[in-house]
Image (cartoon, grey):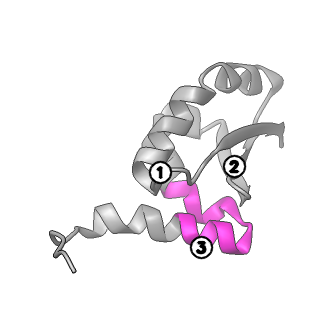
Amino acid sequence: MARRDPQTLDQLLPRVLARLAEQSGKGRTLVPVWNATVGPHISKHSRPHSLEGGTLVVTVASAEWAHTLSRQQDTLREQLNARLGPGSVSALFFRLE
């Protein structure tokens, strides 16, 4: 068995949160990861709601935010997967609060 380098809590925590969100279906556990990924401005207007089958449902404050984030979904998905682990988020769905 190959030895892996020790990982920091910052590296491990997002993957644990993703596993919890997937198992419970509740995206609230991903709020810290979402906020770190999208930044303070976007996080004021959106938050993760649920993660099921790789689809992250994000509630947004308005239709304009849904449209804006939909245009950025490929980049957001890549950034989230970089933090949560490959394939954790296969799709994003935006819905109004």
Q: Residue at x 66, y 19 (%)?
A: 71
Residue identifier under label 3: 20
Residue identifier under label 2: 56
Which region is colored magenta? 18-32
Q: Main secondary structure of the magenta part?
A: helix
Q: Quadrant of the N terminus?
A: bottom left
Residue identifier under label 1: 86
Residue found at the very far bottom of the displayed protein: 1
For label 2, the crowd category at 10 Å Cα-Cα, with few meaning under 14, some 14 to 19 and many 20 or more, is many
10 over 37 or under it: above or below: below
Q: Position of residue 52 (x, y in %)?
A: 74, 59
Q: Residue at x 23, y 68 (%)?
A: 8
Q: CA distance from mark 2 to mark 3?
A: 13 Å
**Amino acid type, label 2:** Leu
Q: CA distance from mark 3 to mark 1?
A: 16 Å
Q: Residue at x 72, y 66 (%)?
A: 26
Q: Is residue 38 magenta?
A: no
Which is nearer the eye, 92 or 63? Answer: 92
**Amino acid type, label 3:** Leu
**Amino acid type, label 1:** Pro
